[in-house]
Amino acid sequence: VLRQALRHQGYAPVTATSGLAALEKLQASVRADDPIDLILWGATVSDTDGGDALNEFQTNEALSDISVLMLIEKQVLKDRLTALDRAVSEYVAKPVDPQELIGRIQTLLRHRAKERWLQNRNDALIALHELILQIYSIQNLDTMLRLIVEKATHLVGAKRSLILLIDEEKEGG
């Protein structure tokens, strides 16, 4: 039922039957540069396999930023405490309403998209800061301008453009 609801919303669910199988699929998706965006954990966490997988999600740098939405048994306090202890992004008690679940998934994915956007902006600011430090260290105007153009086109993802600078200084100086 959940898989069908996810497909109906345009998602492409990848399934795993254990924590170990989930780790293998997650690592393969990272290696293929097509990372999984969210883990919908419907299995029991109290077993060794599930606990080990959650530990790996927390400690593996490539996996630690993936949101985990856990489906837990409403009456089982241990599962709720485990979810909170293991830094699960959010949990929903079973039986779950598919519309509520889709809404929570969409919210977590929106948060993840914002985090990625902020990380990209942060990376661009760091690169810009490094560029500014390089520019301040250069004494020759021509070298400085070449560096600025080269780095700026790289930062914005543009193709390199030739710029004719008309200046009263002699050519090549």
Image: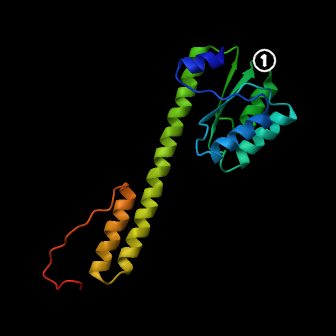
Question: Measuring 50% from the left and 45% from the top, which residue is drawn there?
Answer: 116
Question: Measuring 32% from the left and 76% from the top, which residue is drawn there?
Answer: 144
Q: Quadrant of the C terminus?
A: bottom left
Instruction: Identify whether 49 is placed above or below 105.
Output: below
Q: Quadrant of the N terminus?
A: top right
Residue 157, quarter of picture: bottom left
Instruction: Identify whether 118 is placed above or below 90.
Output: below
On screen, residue 86 versus residue 98, left or right, reads right
Residue 125: x and y, percent?
Answer: 42, 59
Q: Is residue 122 visible?
A: yes
Instruction: Identify whether 74 is placed above or below 148.
Output: above
Q: Nearer the viewer, residue 114 or 22?
A: 22
Q: Nearer the viewer, residue 57 or 154?
A: 154
Q: Residues within 10 Å of mark 1 (few under 14, many from 20)?
A: few
Residue 168: x and y, percent?
Answer: 12, 81
Q: Nearer the viewer, residue 82 or 111?
A: 111
Residue 10: x and y, percent?
Answer: 52, 23
Question: Measuring 53% from the left and 20% from the top, which residue is drawn there?
Answer: 9
Q: Which residue is mark 1?
A: 75
Residue 32: x and y, percent?
Answer: 62, 45
Q: Amino acid at mark 1?
A: Gln
Mark 1, secondary structure of its residue? loop
